[in-house]
Image (tube, rainbow, N blue to C red):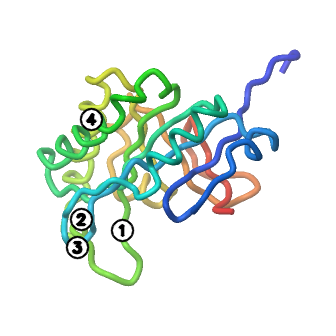
Amino acid sequence: ENGKKISYVGVDISKQTGSVNFRSLKAAGVDYVMIRVGGRGYSTGQISLDDDFKEHIEGAIAEELDIGIYFYSQAISPEEAVQEASFVIQNLEPYRAHIKYPVAIDMEFVANDEARIDGLSREDRTNVTIAFLEAVKGAGYVPMVYGDKEWLIKEVDLTKLQNYDIWLAQEADIPDYPYQYAMWQYSTK
């Protein structure tokens, strides 16, 4: 707009992505990466580091890509959410200077299985989300909420999340999410 770039292209990277050629990503016009730092098991509740986190963040740093982070949450209480945020903050510390994009919480149901969060109310999920976001914010990072349209509208209370950026996941040419969002994941490819 007026000769100034106002939109940036990014990719979501995790152990499911496998090995990534960051030089090729940059050459293809990718501006930033959202790297999965880890997650909590949806049945065990165990927190673990993404198997490829270190390789991914160091590769992105080497190619001078902007970096954001996300954590797959299955916290069932605000206390567990703070525990997850502490895990994220601890693992980001050596890379703090390189985290220019938000640190997002990704909480979602599990397809074809039961998950720890299934029994939570909408209010419970919202309180867990806020606890994570506030802990991340308190550590000096920009907090963000990840979700698809259904999750964001039905499963959390957006009126209580208005102070946080949204990372919308919706595969479409034009999203029909009726609210403002800061980041849009339009493809899983």
Q: Report the Cα–Cα distance between label 3 and label 1.
A: 12 Å
Q: Are marks 4 and 3 in contact (CB under 8 Å)?
A: no
The secondary element bearing badge 2 is classed as helix
Q: Residue at x 64, y 62 (%)?
A: 188
**Residue that badge 2 annotates:** 117
**Residue that badge 1 annotates:** 109
Q: How many marks?
A: 4
Q: Quadrant of the C terminus?
A: bottom right
The secondary element bearing badge 3 is classed as loop
Residue 129: percent from left, percent from top: 28, 45
Q: Nearer the viewer, mark 2 or mark 3?
A: 3
* Vertical position of residue 136 compared to residue 28: above or below: above
Apparent side of residue 12 relative to residue 43 in the rendered image (left or right): right
Apparent side of residue 144 relative to residue 24 in the rendered image (left or right): left
The secondary element bearing badge 4 is classed as helix
Residue sitting farthest toward the right = 3
Residue 80: percent from left, percent from top: 15, 49
The secondary element bearing badge 1 is classed as loop
- State the image quarter where residue 132 is shown: top left
Q: Report the Cα–Cα distance between label 1 and label 2.
A: 7 Å
Q: Report the Cα–Cα distance between label 1 and label 4.
A: 26 Å
Q: Which mark is residue 165?
A: none
- Mark earlier in primary sequence (3, 1): 3
Q: Are marks 4 and 2 in contact (CB under 8 Å)?
A: no
- Mark earlier in primary sequence (4, 2): 4
* Vertical position of residue 75 compared to residue 130: above or below: below
Q: Quadrant of the N terminus?
A: top right
**Residue that badge 4 annotates:** 90
**Residue that badge 3 annotates:** 43
Q: Dot 1, how many residues are within 10 Å of its Cα: few (below 14), some (14-19), or many (20+)?
A: some
